[in-house]
Amino acid sequence: MGIKEQIKSALQEAEIYRAQGLLNEAMLTYKNLIELINNNVKPENSQQLLEGINNKVETLKKAISKYKESEQIPQLSAEIQNLIKEKFTFSTDKESATLEGAIILTKFGQFERAIKEFNKLLNIDSLRLVAAKNILRCYFASSGADNAVSQYEEWLKLGIFSAAQEEKINFFLGNLLKEKGIGKKIVAPEMKKHADQQILIDKIASDKRKTPSESLSHISKPDNKREEFLDITSVGIIMDIGQKKESEVVLDVAFQSEDMVSLIIPDREKALIEKFKTGLKLNNINFYSPIAILNGSGIVLAFSKIDSGPKKGNYSLDLRMFTN
Amino acid sequence: MAVFNLKSREIECKIVFYGPGRSGKTTNLEYIFRTYKKQVSDQMVTIDTEGDRTLFFDFLPMGLGKIKGCDVKVQLYTVPGQVQYTSTRKLVLKGADGIVFVADSFSIRREKNMLSLKDLDQNLKECGLNIFRIPLVLQYNKRDIADIPGNTIPIMPVEEMQNDLNRQLKVPYFPASALSGQGVGATLKECLKLTLVHLQKEFNWAQ
């Protein structure tokens, strides 16, 4: 094939790629063509041709950048959002399906609608905490950390969560801010009034199904003061777990906020994972800091499997620490 | 996952069109929507972005009528082909009963075809499915380009595509042109046939 035919053929090829939406392939073909012309055609004969090709390359560059700009996720119509909820929700149980529907909206980037759906779930006791956490996540993903913090502060004013829930939300928001590298300080939840606490304590005491250790997680410390803690680097939990009877399991601290720490438990620690549940009181714990080892106890505030990110499959344990 | 209502004798299954970006998945659905009007039970939903690239998915519900005493409904979906939308592809793939893999016949897209098939394999695994077990049909799209007089675009021979994509899978394949519709109906029919036979083993839906 002569040089003229090669040029003609390459031009046709690039044009078809462009028409097919294969913009990068069209760009590559034009660039190869420019090289072919520069190597084989005398400059005085190629100037006009190269100008024409360069114009096409510029048009392609604009199309590629327009495409990249349009990758921002649009807010879809309510009809399509409903379709997404309907078609991508698989739970059969009504409450789980409602939660799954709201979560699926976040996965498709429909944060505004998802926030509305999660807000409805705040009325359901069993879903209140998970809904609140998801609302904060939605604000982080859409309008930013400031809105998440404002929402959290508004909840504190409204007092719609129990003291334990407020603690957990505070801890969760603190973690989110830290993950994003935002050094914003958030207001710690104030302790509920003594009367409210007494009602809560009475309620828990009357619930015979619950063990004393389970009910502890709902009660704030009686003197309403939090212990001041050193920076804890790892936590050694001493407990009876199968063959590891009375042995110490040392877990690294992923995050610390005052007297609460978040620990990551590798999924291989099966026996340990089976043992943990929210509200469990651990009576013998070593808290390792760079300057001292403290002995004390702790209450499991939250325990859940990590569903995404590099630690997916492992477990996250939030623990409140008490020293002896 | 297919839903079989024993009482009303109605089965609903999900077919997903998978493949690299710009291989013609949406064009397949558009052709089906235009051509099989009697079977199409609602509007086709398309969520796309600049340059007509699928952003989330396309959705086309169809009713095939009574087959062996059972009312058969099918939901056709496409996934976004661009590499960066892998999490969306996983969401759409969840619960799929059958797959049409739309490969691009342009030689320049050879690697993209293979990467997309690998991505399908991986995503199926994550959904608890197996590429060797799920009803799967390959479509080698854009064959019409080769028929254009004076065409100089390098097109892969079917044998080469078979060698690249179907050497181990050994599933039915169809040369096609989604733009003209050639091979589109045959691809869909074969995938539906495989899917319904597969679901018969699971639900025993056919009388």
Image (tube, coloured by chain):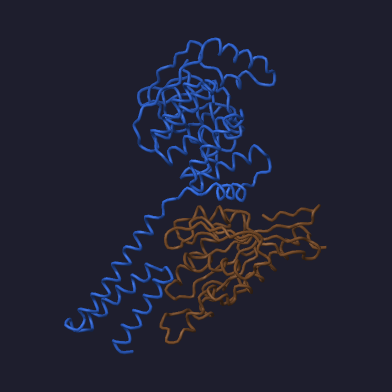
Chain coloured brown in the rendered structure: B
Q: Quadrant of residue A120?
A: top right
Closest to the observer: A285 or B186? B186
* Above or below, B198 relative to A31: above
Residue drawn at x 46%, y 62% is B52
* Above or below, A34 relative to A250: below
* Above or below, B13 relative to A309: below
Q: Quadrant of residue A211?
A: top right
Residue A122 placed where, x, y %? 57, 30
* Above or below, A11 relative to A5: above
Residue drawn at x 50%, y 52% is B87
Q: Name the quadrant of the N terminus of chain A.
A: bottom left
Q: Residue furthest bottom?
A: A2
Residue B35 placed where, x, y %? 62, 71
Residue B100 placed where, x, y %? 59, 66
Say whether residue B203 is left or right of residue A193: right
Chain coloured blue in the rendered structure: A
Say whether residue B71 is left or right of residue B130: right
Residue A239 placed where, x, y %? 56, 26
Residue drawn at x 47%, y 31% is A172
